[in-house]
Amino acid sequence: MADDRMPLTVGQAAERLGVTVRTLHHWDAEGVACPSERSGTGYRLYTGADLERLERVVIYRELGLGLDAVRALLDDPTVDVVAALREQNVQLEVRVQHLRDLHGSVQRMIEAHERGILMPPEQQKRVFGTGWDPSWPAQARARWGDTPQWRQYAERAASRSPSEWSGLSQESRELDDALARAVREGTLPGNPRANDLVERHRALLSQYFPLTRQMQVCLGRLYESDPGFAGHYDSQQPGLASWFHESIDANARAHGVDPDTAEWE
């Protein structure tokens, strides 16, 4: 970069080095790197040697060194430059690793927003059971991908391991069994047992995104009206979809929420 034959103005040097003119003026004022010549019209100029010094300042500053440390490395003959650079290199390796980790986290976040679950289809079936359809996450994204809840779901999914997914799947199966058993045993909506199951359901879904009772009421409507959801619950126990909807509404009323006016919020 440096060229003894072509002194550069402050603006030209700043452009070549990728820094601002204000930065060069500051380094000049601090005595770290100063232009050593002037043009015929009085403009201060950086010679090739000046630019070489500036290049070293830029590198040292990018390594995180303060101006006093930079000045010492450049001008103090007692400073062990190699030792100082080795120390900075170690810190640089730590920063590089941090950036690699951050890059991986961002990549997983992108994929989670796009795919919902970061597992291949066959692994999803092993984790969620043979009845699982790997196309469901894509369907969910198409339906709710623009909502804050999908974003919250994706952010949590990005860091969720297969074993954690397996644990959530087991909780869901156990809840389905408990709901079906409650219907078979004649538990009425609003009964303490039914209310406990509704709260258990809300706690489970809140591991995906925060679920208010108002939002749970909206889900209860969907569980009964949507053929896919209704089919799932009624396959566990005939009439379960309607019973669950009624139980969610009854529990909401007990907590001061009017199911007839509840909205997704």
Image (spheres, grey):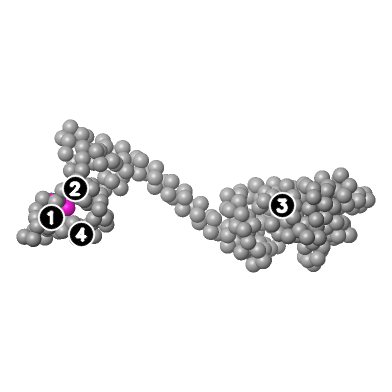
Q: Which residue is mark 1?
A: 44
For the question of whether residue 140 can be seen, the reply is yes
Query: Considering only order in the chain, which callout, 1 or 2, is on the residue closer to the N terminus?
Result: 2
Q: Amino acid at mark 3?
A: Thr
Instruction: Look at the image and tell me in which quarter the C terminus lies.
Output: bottom right
Q: Tell me how far mark 2 sits from mark 3, CA to CA.
A: 60 Å
Query: Considering only order in the chain, which callout, 1 or 3, is on the residue closer to the N terminus?
Result: 1
Which residue is more in the foreground, 236 or 76? 76
Q: Which residue is mark 2?
A: 28
Cβ–Cβ under 8 Å for marks 2 and 1: yes
Q: Is residue 110 above or below residue 61?
A: below
Which residue is more in the foreground, 40 or 117? 40
Q: Amino acid at mark 1?
A: Arg
Q: Which residues are magenta?
A: 44-52
Q: Which mark is residue 212?
A: 3
User: Dot 4 lies on which element?
Assistant: helix
Q: Tell me how far mark 2 sits from mark 4, CA to CA.
A: 13 Å
